[in-house]
């Protein structure tokens, strides 16, 4: 169905679409994919057992390890002649997760991406610069296909090449861009340094690929004079473009006619109600080449109840808070990057960049250093600010890090994803 056909459906009508899609996916996977048939047989469930959305809990989970164990195309549910493209995850350990696509899969993905630009308030008159990677990774070609389906002008530069990016932005009067948050910050600081902002026509930034804090979001918007939009996605679920936060910024609208989302307790696997934070589990509803049934994404978020104030029918999640596999344990305390973002957010004296460094001190005790940038022009009491940050950490986490404040720009910038947590105990 098209965007216009589903954008104002009632919740019950959307549930009906999801139920139909769930039944089709289970039948398709069971009939055409030996991997899923074996998993369902082992779980004692058949396609005929799936009668309502509530029956999804009878189905077994699919994990990233399942995809790697069946490398390269062991979970395919269509004949090889119907596969027109493959992409692969950007994973750094073991075999990559290879994902096949049929022609319909690619058309559906382009439709999802096109919706993202609508939600960001763009029109076919806009000029959108793509500043993310092309190749096996899903981002670049996905953004470009979505822009072309949407009818806007695509400027497909790819990552890096900052001089060229800025030259094209100015000369073509580009109105929107697609990038990682790390590169958007880097680019914004270059725009400020070169005094280019008055000569640009940017109004929107579509940003994804990594978690980014509200503070970083505000800084990017200040530097570039844009409204930013958070775009989630992963290769296993087509790629980026599975949803977007609209101009109301009340959570991420996900395309609930293409996906069925659950939130589970990552330790027990039990389903959690809307409003509670846990691990996102996704089921595709019309994906042909490699359907995903109850795929454990490891992303932490929550389902948001009710309808967005924008009035659109698509269901919502909160912005992603981190990943279950990104947790570090320090002196018996579990710490996620999202917690550090939250703890630093109230301090107006700070910039968006920090490093959380864990090392092994003499005697075997964990030593923790929090290195944080100050805002441009900060000239206040650095020692007092550091002590306040320490106390806030202890009050909320039960851990007191050493705090080192550095001047704005003192931490490294990158054109790729920014690493913020460094566990040097692993190097010993």
Image: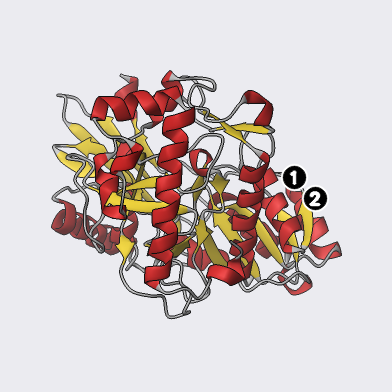
Q: Name the residue at the front extreme.
A: 48
Residue 83 percent location from the top left of the image: 65, 31
Q: How crowded is mark 2: few (under 14 residues within 10 Å), some or many (20 or more)?
A: few
Residue 44 as seen in the image, left or right of residue 296: left
164 and 3: which one is in front?
3
Question: What mark, if any, has residue 164 been given in the picture?
Answer: 2
Residue 75 percent location from the top left of the image: 48, 26
Q: At 38% from the left edge and 55% from the top edge, which residue is drawn?
A: 19
194 and 282: which one is in front?
282
Residue 7 percent location from the top left of the image: 53, 72
Q: What residue did someone put label 1 on?
A: 161
SS class, disc 2 = helix
Asked if the residue at tag 2 contacts the one at tag 1, i.e. Cβ–Cβ closer than 8 Å, the answer is yes
Residue 425 percent location from the top left of the image: 29, 26
Q: How crowded is mark 1: few (under 14 residues within 10 Å), some or many (20 or more)?
A: few
Question: Where is the C terminus found, in terms of image quarters?
Answer: top left
SS class, disc 1 = loop
Question: Where is the N terminus found, in terms of image quarters?
Answer: bottom right
Q: At 25% from the left edge and 56% from the top edge, which residue is drawn?
A: 277
Above-or-below relation of 291 to 338 = above
Residue 224 as seen in the image, left or right of residue 252: right
């Amino acid at each position: 169905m098209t965007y216009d056909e589903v954008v104002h459906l009632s919740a019950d009508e959307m549930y009906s679409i999801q139920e139909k899609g769930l039944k089709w996916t289970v039948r398709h996977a069971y009939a055409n994919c030996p991997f899923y048939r074996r998993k369902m047989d082992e779980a004692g469930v058949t396609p005929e057992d799936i009668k309502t959305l509530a029956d999804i809990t009878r189905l077994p989970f699919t994990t990233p390890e399942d995809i790697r164990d069946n490398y390269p195309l062991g979970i395919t549910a269509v004949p090889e002649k119907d596969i027109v493209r493959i992409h692969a995850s950007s994973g750094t350990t073991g075999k990559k997760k290879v994902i096949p696509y049929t022609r319909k899969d690619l058309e559906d993905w382009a439709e999802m991406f096109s919706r993202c630009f609508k939600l960001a308030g763009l029109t076919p008159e806009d000029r959108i610069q793509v500043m993310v990677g092309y190749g096996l990774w899903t981002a670049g070609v996905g953004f470009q296909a979505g822009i072309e389906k949407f009818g806007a002008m695509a400027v497909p530069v790819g990552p890096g090449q900052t001089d060229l990016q800025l030259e094209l932005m100015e000369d073509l009067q580009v109105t929107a861009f697609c990038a990682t948050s790390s590169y958007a910050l880097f680019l914004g600081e270059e725009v400020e340094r070169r005094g280019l902002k008055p000569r640009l026509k940017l109004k929107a930034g579509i940003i994804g690929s990594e978690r980014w804090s509200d503070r970083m979001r505000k800084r990017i918007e200040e530097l570039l004079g844009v409204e930013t939009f958070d775009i989630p996605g992963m290769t296993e679920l087509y790629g980026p473009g599975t949803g977007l936060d609209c101009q109301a910024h009340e959570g991420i609208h996900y395309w609930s006619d293409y996906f069925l989302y659950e939130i589970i307790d990552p330790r027990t696997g039990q389903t959690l109600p809307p409003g509670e934070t846990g691990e996102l589990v996704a089921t595709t509803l019309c994906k042909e080449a490699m359907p995903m049934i109850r795929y454990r994404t490891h992303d932490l978020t929550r389902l948001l109840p009710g309808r967005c104030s924008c009035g659109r029918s698509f269901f919502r999640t909160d912005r992603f808070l981190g990943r279950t596999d990104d947790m570090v344990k320090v002196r018996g305390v579990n710490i996620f990057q999202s917690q550090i973002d939250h703890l630093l957010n109230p301090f107006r004296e700070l910039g968006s960049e920090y490093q959380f460094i864990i090392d092994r001190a003499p005697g075997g005790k964990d030593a923790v250093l929090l290195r944080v940038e100050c805002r441009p022009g900060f000239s206040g009491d650095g020692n007092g600010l550091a002590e306040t940050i320490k106390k806030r950490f202890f009050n909320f986490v039960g851990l007191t890090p050493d705090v080192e404040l550095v001047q704005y720009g003192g931490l490294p910038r990158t054109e790729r994803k920014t690493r913020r947590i460094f566990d040097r105990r692993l190097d010993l």
